[in-house]
Image: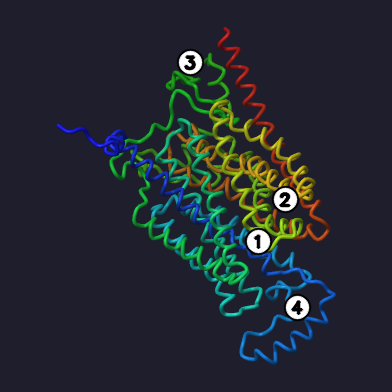
Amino acid sequence: MAQLPPGIRFITSFSRDQWYRAFIFSLTFLLYASFHLSRKPISIVKGELHKHCAASHEVELDSYKEYAAQIQPLKKPFNASQCGWEPFDKNNYKQLLGALDYSFLCAYAVGMYLSGLIGERLPIRYYLTGGMLASGLFTAMFGLGYFYNIHNLWFYIMAQIANGLVQTTGWPSVVTCIGNWFGKGRRGLIMGIWNSHTSVGNILGSLIAAYWVSTCWGLSFVVPGVIVAVMGIVCFLFLIEHPKDVSCSCTPSSSSKTFLNGTSRCRIQMPTLNAKENGKLQDPEIQHLLSDSENSSVSLNSSTVASGEGRHGTSAISFLGALRIPGVVEFSLCLLFAKLVSYTFLFWLPLYITSVEHLDAKRAGDLSTLFDVGGIFGGILAGLISDRLEKRASTCGMMLLLAAPTLYMFSTVSKMGLEATVVMLLISGALVNGPYALITTAVSADLGTHKSLKGNARALSTVTAIIDGTGSVGAALGPLLAGLISPSGWNNVFYMLMVADACALLLLLRLIQKELQCDADHTLFKEH
């Protein structure tokens, strides 16, 4: 009998379940990367919507305007100031561009709270497909303003609001799907790698938008819109919501080793131990677990979780029930400030680079991708460290502590030249996006499968939506504040970002303290 070829041996070395999990991992990665791909163009095009022009050229522009009117009477109207695209060519352009960001992000924040509740009650495949098709439409709609010579501010604001609402279908859906397929073992590392889809999407979006920004900025929106819509069709054809749908084995929701997130640590060797039956808890880890969640476990399961068999036998958790899960409020508020910083960079970094380095919109957009490259490594590093230490909150706190002084260094060093800017973009991207990535993925999945829920997997979408929705409030405030503060100087924007990082760290202090206390109690328990 002939020996199997190496490629076939490689394929057969993995089980059917492993191939399905790899497929879902890759598919959800690409689906959400396309969402972020469609969000990035607005930050790249800002440098084209408003161009810096010197007041000394006004006379020359007036004469050119008369000449252009004579020789090109049939072409589109001449822009009065030649400082960009009307209405963003005025002196208040930063406020107007900030309004575009705020419109999208505010709609996204409001819609996210509803999206998780709706998503739990609809098939994920249909819900996500509809959202992606609508997102492709509204992304392209913004770019059509270029081709139809539209200069009405409200047209662009409404396109941003509509896009923000429909994009809320994405995150709860993909996190729920990936949470169904992957258990808690090495969740931080797996989701850290998976969450790099945000940075990959930002990089691809920057490159695509930058390719057309100087020649035909409308295509910077139309092409990403088409890509998102195509990926929506792929989602409809191939997305599998749960392993049970294809008779794959479910990864156990718990194991002998899971992770600290400031509210629980699961290294419980006797899962059937009951405090009321035994009267005394000997392991301090179990004491910490039940002291936080015993009461909420009763209320959660009596009021919001109906008993039943399988994932379809349990009812969806209520909004207030999800808030009672220990750690949800703290991590949600922490993410508000962490996402404020991240999204300020996402929407304003290319314009900042244009201002400081005096580069054109295309080169600034290309250079800004380095921040997302750093974010990829930061997300993976945060997941790896949190898995090794088994401390989610402490890992976030450590990176937030380092991020604040790094932002100050970035504001200072970036003015020293292009090489210094490159280095600081990579470091800042890692430290800013690390906590953001960890909270929105591994922490959300941990809390969505918290022991107080007693196996109700349908809570994951609501918990994810609450955490990311609260974070999106910060994402809306960050670019808005940047637009209001930047006229007084970019240094003031960086001071605002440093204060936000400090607030995020302060909100995690209680959870960090509990993690350290629980670790100390566990060590003491071992000694005795």
Q: Locate the N terminus and report the quarter of the image it occupies.
A: top left
Total tally of numbered discs in the picture: 4
- Foreground residue among 443 and 470: 443
Indicate which disc, 2 or 3, sits on the residue closer to the N terminus. 3
Give the mark toward the camera: 4 or 3. 4
The residue under label 3 is 278
What amino acid is found at the position of numbered circle 4 in the picture? Ser
What residue sits 49% from the left and 68% below the top?
A: 137
Q: CA distance from mark 1 to mark 3?
A: 56 Å
Give the mark toward the camera: 4 or 2. 2
Q: CA distance from mark 2 to mark 1?
A: 27 Å
Q: Position of residue 141 (x, y in %)?
A: 54, 71
The mark found on residue 411 in the picture is: none
- Foreground residue among 84 and 69: 69
Residue 294 horizontal side relative to residue 269, left or right: right
Give the mark toward the camera: 1 or 3. 1
Q: Position of residue 216 (x, y in %)?
A: 58, 72
The residue under label 2 is 418
Q: CA distance from mark 2 to mark 3?
A: 66 Å
Packing grade of label 1 (10 A; few <14, some 14-19, many >=20) is many
Give the mark toward the camera: 2 or 3. 2
What amino acid is found at the position of numbered circle 1 in the picture? Asp
User: On screen, 14 above or below 342?
Assistant: above
What residue sits 68% from the left and 74% below the top?
A: 85
The residue under label 1 is 101
